[in-house]
Amino acid sequence: NYTKHACRGACASVGIRRIMQTVDFFRRTGYNNNMHEKKIRTVDDIIAATEEYGFLTFWDAEKTAASTLSAIDFSTLWDLREQAVNSRRVAYGKYFRKKMTFVSLELFPHLCALRRDGYDFDSLADEGKAPRREILVMDAVNADPAPVPSYALGRSLAVKGFDAAVASLQNKTYLCVTFKKSAMGTALLNMPEDIFGSELVRSAYGLSNAQNAEILSTAKVFKEYSEEEIKKALTPAV
């Protein structure tokens, strides 16, 4: 199995400057948007909201997200995000609209089966369907038994487009994010199978793409999106 590696921030580097830019963004664009019921105050509230909506982006200026549902300040929400993810009661990664997103464990197996189109990463690489830079990232993740910061991993690999490769691997559900407690909010890249177990992650492999897409389409959050946006989210990524 692929081992865990560290990256800073949501999927790669997130320093103090990036955090402060995000805080400023929330303040300027309606972080506490009154159009949404404020229901997130605790870790359990994040889990419950994720289970209610199916997909819950961490932040969004207008759509339903942890940010727009939050009844607490951003720094507290930031900390609760790490706790929710580390509880292993939700999956977390760049899974929806290129944003960091919580996904319910009820829907996550269907997302994995659909996005992967039935391919484990090794099979994808063997058939020549994985980009070279993504193979290098996954090989590096597999090679080192200890988590390392992504900036160090990227520097050691010297792969052009390293951050994009990491984001793509999350979108394809071959990677998920957990967190190591630190002042910088150090994120760890993992194979979902290592976090949730192969039995759960691959439990929807026996269904067709159409069946998995139909199940995923029932997510409450999709009521806010256009047919085109939903179709894009419910399409294989490989």
Image (tube, rainbow, N blue to C red):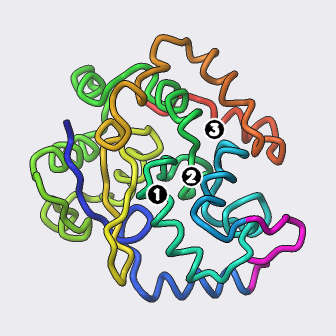
Q: Secondary structure at mark 3?
A: helix
Q: Quick one: label 2 or label 3, which is nearer the N terminus? A: 2
Q: Which residue is mark 3?
A: 233
Q: Secondary structure at mark 2?
A: strand
Inspect the magenta stretch and tell me whether residue 191 lies in it: no
Q: Is the residue under label 1 in contact with that under label 3 (CB below 8 Å)?
A: no
- Looking at the picture, which amino acid does disc 3 mark? Ala
Q: Which residue is mark 1?
A: 85
Q: Residue at x 19, y 60 (%)?
A: 147
- Looking at the picture, which amino acid does disc 1 mark? Val
Q: Which residue is mark 2?
A: 102
Q: Residue at x 67, y 63 (%)?
A: 66
Label 2 and label 3: CA atoms lie apart by 14 Å
Give the x, y percent position of residue 150: 26, 65
Residue 19's place in the image compared with 94, above or below, is: below
Look at the image and give the residue range highlighted in magenta.
Answer: 28-39
User: Which residue is outermost to the right?
Assistant: 35
Label 1 and label 2: CA atoms lie apart by 8 Å
Residue 18's place in the image compared with 102, above or below, is: below
Q: Residue at x 29, y 40 (%)?
A: 194
Q: Quick one: label 1 or label 2, which is nearer the N terminus? A: 1
Which mark is in front, 3 or 1?
1
Question: Would you identify the image quadrant in which residue 11 lies?
Answer: bottom left
Q: Quick one: label 3 or label 1, which is nearer the N terminus? A: 1
Give the x, y percent position of residue 4: 23, 52
Question: Would you identify the image quadrant in which residue 29 lies?
Answer: bottom right
Q: Residues within 10 Å of mark 3 (few under 14, many from 20)?
A: many
What kind of secondary structure does the magenta stretch mostly adopt? Answer: loop
Give the x, y percent position of residue 153: 19, 63
Q: Is the residue under label 2 in contact with that under label 1 (CB below 8 Å)?
A: yes
Q: Secondary structure at mark 1?
A: helix
Q: Residues within 10 Å of mark 1 (few under 14, many from 20)?
A: many
